[in-house]
Amino acid sequence: MTQYWEPVDRENMVGNKKQKNPYIVGTPIEEPEKFFGRESLFSFIDDNLRQNVQVILLHGQRRIGKSSVLKQIPNFVGNNEFIFVRFDLQDQGQSNLSSILHYLAREIVDHLLLEGQVQPPNLEDLEAYTNIFSDNFLPSVYQAIGDRNLVLLLDEFDVLDQNNDIVNKGAGFFNYLNSLTSEQKRLFIIPVVGRHLNDLENLRSLFRGAPYQEIGFLDYVSAQRLIVNPANNVLQYELDAIKAILELSGGHPYFTQVICFAIFGTARDLNNWTVTRADVESIVGKAIESAEAGLAWFWEGLSISEQAIFSAVAEAQKIASEQGQLLPEGPLTLLKSYGVIETDSLVEAARKLAEKGFLDDTGRRVKVELVRRWLVKCHPLQEISQLKPPAPKNGIQIQRKRVLIGLIAAVATIATVGFGAYRVATPCPPGQQKALLGIGCEPDTRRISRGDRTLFPNIKNSNRERGISAFKQGNYSQAEQFFKNAVAGDRNDPEVLIYYNNALAKEKGSPVTWAAVVPADNQEPIAKEILRGVAQAQNQFNQKGGLNGRLLEIVIGNDANEPEQAKQIAAELVKDKSVLGVIGHYSSDATKPALDEYNKTELAIISPTSTSTSLQGNNFFRTVPSDADAGKELAEYARKPLNLNSVVIFYNPDSTYSDSLREEFTKNFEKLGGSVVRRINLTEPKFDPETEVAKSLWRDKAQAVVLFPDTQNTDVALKIVTANAQQTARLKTNPQNPQRQGLKLLGGDTLYSKTTLNEDGQSVEGLILAVSWFREAPQAKNFAIAAVQQWGGSVSGRTATSYDATQAFIKALSPNPTRATVLRGLKNINLPDSQTSGYPLKFTSEGERQSESILVKVEGGKFTLLP
């Protein structure tokens, strides 16, 4: 066999048994002479730095040598133009922005030996004003390093983005770095991330335009050098042995080192310093043991579907090899033979594994042969076992297959005798829902229900399912009984009470029909709050016998609070001539496109929750005060009792509700002599609560923060509240500061919720909100008591205003109602407080409720009424 390397000097073999293993496994390579390859990567970095590209993004698999690359960049890149500082973010996953910057500053000073020349900011200073890092610290570093530019090498950059939590954990640091590079022309950053780049779209969009490069497998020549050079003049590799190593590792540097480490250890033990292909094959088991930590990541970092595909590919390769096939069968085909049903998630998993570099381009081979052998050994498909099925019961037999122990915990099937099998263990894919009794999935073709389907499938109630089945068959008396039992089983669920009354109305015949449109898909608690008010009014009306024997039926629509879907629901309701009026939609953004449809007809709509002043129409009414009223009340309170002169407003300009409230507050506040010194977009990609609060307090000299988030951004608004509390606490502990109170807090009704109260008590203490209804108010007492008796607990303002909307429609009824008579009736109603949730109800000519917003304040951990 031809030898790859020159013959070993046998005279130097004495003492080799005691020689240290030269191959490095699991730790970054420090010495340049022990690092091989990556020349093209270093050239890529060097070219971009010299062209003043300030952000260069590197990415690659775990164990691919990313940390080693960062350590070697100063040795192979640049000249005296740049000075490099490596900062490992591994331990910063739970740290806030101030803490990360504090440790980064210390690392810069320590690494560049600037102690005594540059003072890193302490944590307290950074927490008070983050921009001390950019305004004071970095300029002093630039002065100390002369003409050179500073390059930050950021290892484990994506540790701040674990569990897809980039907004809460990573965005502060990521956005701050982005702003730094736009302001600091002498600052460059090279982050390296440990996942495939396509899994980090947020990061890519943040550093828009930044060049990126994968740290991939070594090329053939570099891999050969990695094998041979560390043990030069000790080990003698035959060419076929080198080929065998590369067949096992594929050029992956970690697995190449693992294999060579095992080879060297065995050669030392046997005192046999010539390596053949047979020697390589003999150490595979030992290499797998040594690489267990790295190999485990290949497994634990994958989803269940990806694990299933990964093992199936490995098994298919084994079968193909044993049968002499050139190409193994696809993993989905093999899984099917084991009883696993092909799903979209499995198809997607196969695509992702190839994309991440775990499979080759065909998607039918594991890219690293050593990994494949580990999979076959530790996670084989042969571990499939059948659980003994239970005896048949009521014609239904349950059979479970445990597929890929540790991978797919349960792939379950329900086999109804004579009717095939239906899966129940996995959730339904998008566009489908659980079928009746939860057996299998069916197309989710309808978003409107009278009682023939549930809009809340996550709630389990067997009597509801039986009632739905009977309702579908037109057996309304049986449906009535099942729904009645469902109400008894869950008195807090408004849907089943509505369906119970619908069954009564259907059985009675000739029902009067309203529709209620709610966001059932993604805002279930809010949808139920609205439906409770509707159900309570419907139940009272029907229990009193209805109108001339005609009972009230409620059609429930689900628009998911999505504008386009709201428009589609509205169009369907307009076509349904039995529907005489609509209660809904939830948000102003959903109501606005729906209103375009309703305005084409005489179908009246009463919104119990949409407040934007842009909502107008001849057939539009609302039982909630508009943003004009809420903005006026807040502005007057801020200007007079609170004596505030300057405020900042946080809002979403793309939200009809949020922008409307911002406009009305600003108009009234400035009319009274106040000043809105800044308007801040909550949805900006670079938005950072701590920075914005600090700017508002220190730079803008604001006295208050006014929060007008839409429902999708209330969590962001609460982060502002928390940041303000932190600033206030620092002010109180600093006797040198003339301003001791921090920023006052005011806001809109989207913050009127238990979620707000569940925040740290000191953070939200003093928050003032404009709301439509408050159960502690004297006027609301009677309705609040009745609601508790009905639902078994306190209700919200949405329930109250929805109740009022339903009562308004009931009051507008006539003996033979039509859409036109209902519309005329609404314009003339005048309900006393005894027939509403506590306040008289009368509409202006524009459809506005003649009432005022109520101001509440958080005191002692609860909302209290302001005088």
Image: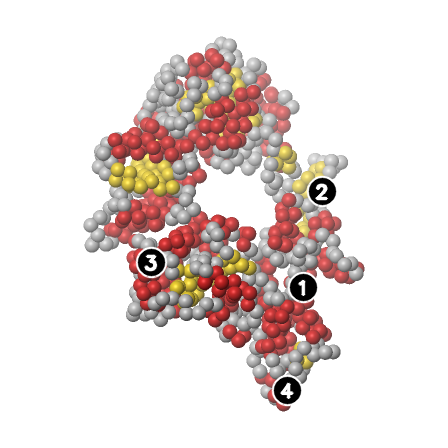
The answer to which of marks 3 and 4 sits earlier in the sequence is: 4
Distance in Å between CA atoms under marks 3 and 2: 70 Å
What secondary structure is marked by label 1? helix
The answer to which of marks 2 and 4 sits earlier in the sequence is: 4
Quadrant in the picture for residue 132: bottom left
- Mark 2 nearby-residue class (10 Å; few <14, some 14–19, many ≥20): few
| Vertical side of 590 occupied by 359: above or below | below
The answer to which of marks 3 and 2 sits earlier in the sequence is: 3
| Vertical side of 263 occupied by 132: above or below | above
Q: Of tags 3 and 2, which is closer to the observer?
A: 3
Q: Of tags 1 and 3, which is closer to the observer?
A: 3
Disc 3 marks a residue whose amino acid type is: Phe
Disc 4 marks a residue whose amino acid type is: Asp
The residue labelled by disc 3 is: 133
- Mark 1 nearby-residue class (10 Å; few <14, some 14–19, many ≥20): some
The residue labelled by disc 1 is: 369
The residue labelled by disc 2 is: 391
Relative placement, left or right, of 174 versus 763 is right
Q: Of tags 4 and 1, which is closer to the observer?
A: 4
For the point 54% across and 24% down, the residue is 571
For the point 66% across and 44% down, the residue is 343
- Mark 4 nearby-residue class (10 Å; few <14, some 14–19, many ≥20): few
The residue labelled by disc 4 is: 9
Nearer to the camera, 474 or 192: 192
Distance in Å between CA atoms under marks 1 and 2: 45 Å
| Vertical side of 101 occupied by 690: above or below | above
For the point 39% across and 53% down, the residue is 182
Distance in Å between CA atoms under marks 4 and 1: 33 Å
